[in-house]
Image: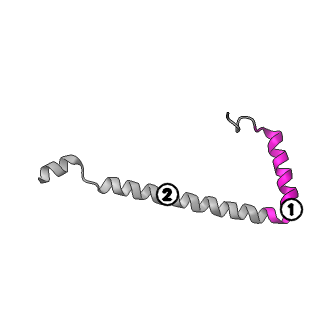
Amino acid sequence: MNLLGIIGGQEIIIILVIVLILFGGRKIPELMRGLGKGVKEYKTAVNGVEEEVKKATDDKPSEDTKEKQQ
């Protein structure tokens, strides 16, 4: 069952109203800043892993090169 297909515009508005009631108007910017920092750190980590994988595959000698060396 795909739950994301069920959520529409009205449901999102209801969720936002509930968040506003629970956390209040003053806490929401602080929560969004924290969320933004988390997303930024996640992207940085993903880019770092991608670079490491790319470097590891580029540095790895091919099988043809190994056979020529032996």
Identity of the residue drawn at 21% across and 47% down: 63
Name the element at disc 2: helix
**Magenta stretch in the rendered image:** 7-28
Q: Which residue appears at 86% of the width and 51% of the height?
A: 17
**Snapshot colouring:** one colour
Report the number of discs: 2
Image height of 21 relative to 9, above or below? below
C-alpha separation, residue under disc 2 versus residue under disc 1: 35 Å
Helix, strand or loop for the magenta stretch, by majority = helix
Quadrant location of the N terminus in the rendered image: top right
Residue 47: image location, x then y, percent: 49, 57
Q: Is residue 7 above or below residue 33?
A: above
Q: Is residue 8 magenta?
A: yes
Amino acid, disc 2: Asn
Residues packed near mark 1 inside 10 Å, few (<14), some (14 to 19) or many (20 plus)? few
| Residue 21 placement: quadrant | bottom right
Amino acid marked by disc 1: Gly
Q: Residues within 10 Å of mark 2 (few under 14, many from 20)?
A: few
Relative depth, front residue between 49 and 2: 2
At 13% from the left and 50% from the top, the residue drawn is 68
Where is residue 5? Give x, y as percent: 71, 35
Question: What residue did someone put label 2 on?
Answer: 47
The quarter of the picture where residue 58 lies is bottom left
Determine the secondary structure under disc 1.
Answer: helix
Of all residues, the one furthest to the right in this rendering is 21
In the picture of the structure, the residue carrying the numbered disc 1 is 24
Tell which residue pokes out farthest to the left in this image.
Answer: 70
Labels 2 and 1: the sequence-earlier one: 1
Whether the magenta-drawn stretch holds residue 45 is answered as no
